[in-house]
């Protein structure tokens, strides 16, 4: 809280998530506030400190336990400690179900925590369904026109579940990572082939009316009003480059200029990505619960489960969403990265596609007809990667496949090929997969070229306004090799 006299109070929430440099920063600020007799309020839930096991680059890392101890030492005899026990957003039954589990975690007693998980598991209804047998009818029966979230422990399991749903036509939003390049698709569709330096409200309205309805979450008038707010002007015309510059730097959660992927009543998510969110109905993985109930794990794993079972407001179920031995996160020593993978008979059979690093966004400027092609691509459409050999070098085309029509829409990055090659270790280029399947469209976005790309001749030739559309897709791709 800042007034004309300076700081009067320092408030920090979600302190259980603070580790390393962020933890040190908050501790330093709290210490300075106390010395300056400035009020401090610190809020958090120690049961939800689930980031302790993330990789740290620091010589002396600070986890949540160390942070809490240092914070307590600073505040001892200088503050009041308050405990909030009731969660009014959950039903009484769910509060009662998780209360013993919460108390055991706070005691820092692994054996009692395991016992509480066994008791809780016995009381959670099990659907007796597997990842591949859950049907759309099952989902609709449970959710009753409300949202429903399927929670898995890691990205690999989540991608597998999503792929199973896509194959069987179950629409859903996939929540594993956020992209900062989530500019709404209408931006590219309106401005890609617009050549005039200035656009009027009338011209904007006319061009906006031509794009597919599924990309129109707002009316042309609503968007123009938001553009006026962004430009701090009530003009009925603006310079296009100024509009695009403002959109590129607008807030990541702007409802008009940004697109959210979780605009669906069925969500497939990792537990970590679901933290801080609530759903009417939650189905979590019985394998994860069973493992924690019968095998001693680090306390942070039990806290991760606690986050999962406290996401629902009304109903909590378990189901067999994963098979623990299938998918592994494989370190790639040659590149320093990691990928979720699956090996079958010691041969790489499935490989994680990471949209943020694996999609070459500039490659979506392949041809002038692409805006029309992309405007007809829908969430859930199949994508496959097709190997290309040129002068001994390997690359992969991004191919959109629908109704037996295959269209090359872009290319993967070199990082993708490097990681794939490092795991396969091919003797010859043809030893690399001929194609990679089971990848699916999650969203169509717009891309506005950054400042360092402004002079790229391929970009300026293809799009005068340096804006175009690209396709976000992901999955645990199924590798198809040549057979001889």
Image: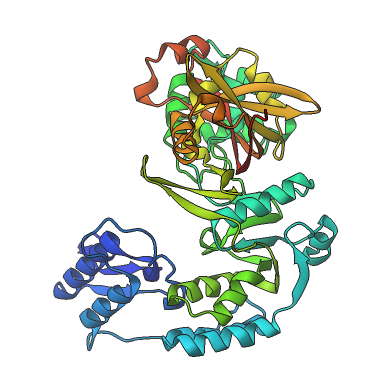
Decide which of 394, 250 is in the foreground and name it.
Answer: 394
Decide which of 6, 58 is in the foreground and name it.
Answer: 58
Q: Is residue 288 visible?
A: yes
* Quarter assignment of residue 141: bottom right
263 above or below 55? above
Left or right: 42 in relation to 138: left
Residue 304, given in percent of the width and then of the height, sits at 50, 70
Quadrant location of the C terminus in the rendered image: top right
Residue 53, given in percent of the width and then of the height, sits at 39, 65
Q: How many marks?
A: 0
* Quarter assignment of residue 203: top right
Left or right: 167 in relation to 454: right
Q: Residue furthest left?
A: 35
Q: Residue at x 41, y 85 (%)?
A: 108
330 above or below 18? above
Decide which of 256, 29 is in the foreground and name it.
Answer: 29
Residue 50, given in percent of the width and then of the height, sits at 44, 68
90 above or below 134? below
Residue 136, given in percent of the width and then of the height, sits at 82, 55
Q: Is residue 236 visible?
A: no
Quadrant location of the N terminus in the rendered image: bottom left
Decide which of 360, 293 is in the foreground and name it.
Answer: 293
353 above or below 282? above
* Quarter assignment of residue 120: bottom right
Q: Residue at x 71, y 72 (%)?
A: 317
Render colour scheme = rainbow
Left or right: 128 in relation to 283: right
Q: Residue furthest front?
A: 484
């Amino acid at each position: 809280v800042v007034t004309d006299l300076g700081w009067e109070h320092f408030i920090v929430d979600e302190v259980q998530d603070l580790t390393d440099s962020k933890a040190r920063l908050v501790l330093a600020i709290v210490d300075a506030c106390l010395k300056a007799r400035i009020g401090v309020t610190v809020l958090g839930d120690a049961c939800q400190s689930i980031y302790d096991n993330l990789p740290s680059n620091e010589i002396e890392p600070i986890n949540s336990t160390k942070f809490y101890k240092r914070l307590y030492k600073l505040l001892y005899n200088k503050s009041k400690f308050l405990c909030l026990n009731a969660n009014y957003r959950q039903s009484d039954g769910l509060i009662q179900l998780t209360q013993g589990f919460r108390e055991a975690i706070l005691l820092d007693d692994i054996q009692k925590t395991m016992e509480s998980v066994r008791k809780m598991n016995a009381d959670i209804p099990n659907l007796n369904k597997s990842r591949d047998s859950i049907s759309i009818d099952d989902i609709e029966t449970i959710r009753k026109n409300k949202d429903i979230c399927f929670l898995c422990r890691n990205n690999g399991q989540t991608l597998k579940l999503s792929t199973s749903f896509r194959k069987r036509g179950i629409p859903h939003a996939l929540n594993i990572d956020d992209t900062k390049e989530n500019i709404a698709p209408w931006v590219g569709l309106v401005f890609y082939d617009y050549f005039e330096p200035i656009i009027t409200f009338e011209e904007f309205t006319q061009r906006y009316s031509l794009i597919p309805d599924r990309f129109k979450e707002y009316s042309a008038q609503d968007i123009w009003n938001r553009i006026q707010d962004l430009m701090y002007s009530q003009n009925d015309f603006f310079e296009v480059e100024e509009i695009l510059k403002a959109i590129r730097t607008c807030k990541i959660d702007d409802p008009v200029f940004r697109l959210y992927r979780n605009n669906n009543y069925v969500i497939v998510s990792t537990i970590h990505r679901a933290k801080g969110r609530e759903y009417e109905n939650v189905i979590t993985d019985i394998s994860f619960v069973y493992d924690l109930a019968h095998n001693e794990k680090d306390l942070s794993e039990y806290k991760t489960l606690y986050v999962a079972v406290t996401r629902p407001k009304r109903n909590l179920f378990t189901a067999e969403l994963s098979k623990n031995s299938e998918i592994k996160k494989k370190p790639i020593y040659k590149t320093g990265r990691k990928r979720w993978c699956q090996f079958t008979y010691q041969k790489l059979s499935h490989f994680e596609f990471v949209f943020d690093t694996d999609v070459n966004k500039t490659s979506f400027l392949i041809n002038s007809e692409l805006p029309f092609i992309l405007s007809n691509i829908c969430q859930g459409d199949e994508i496959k990667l097709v190997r290309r050999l040129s002068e001994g070098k390997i690359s992969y085309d991004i191919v959109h496949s629908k109704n037996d029509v295959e269209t090359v829409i872009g290319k993967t990055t070199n990082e993708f090929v490097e990681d794939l090659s490092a795991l396969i270790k091919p003797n010859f280029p043809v030893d690399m997969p001929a194609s990679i399947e089971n990848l699916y469209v999650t969203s169509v976005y717009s891309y506005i070229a950054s400042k360092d790309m402004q002079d790229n001749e391929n970009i300026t030739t293809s799009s005068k306004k340096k804006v175009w559309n690209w396709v976000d897709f992901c999955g645990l791709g199924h590798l198809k090799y040549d057979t001889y």
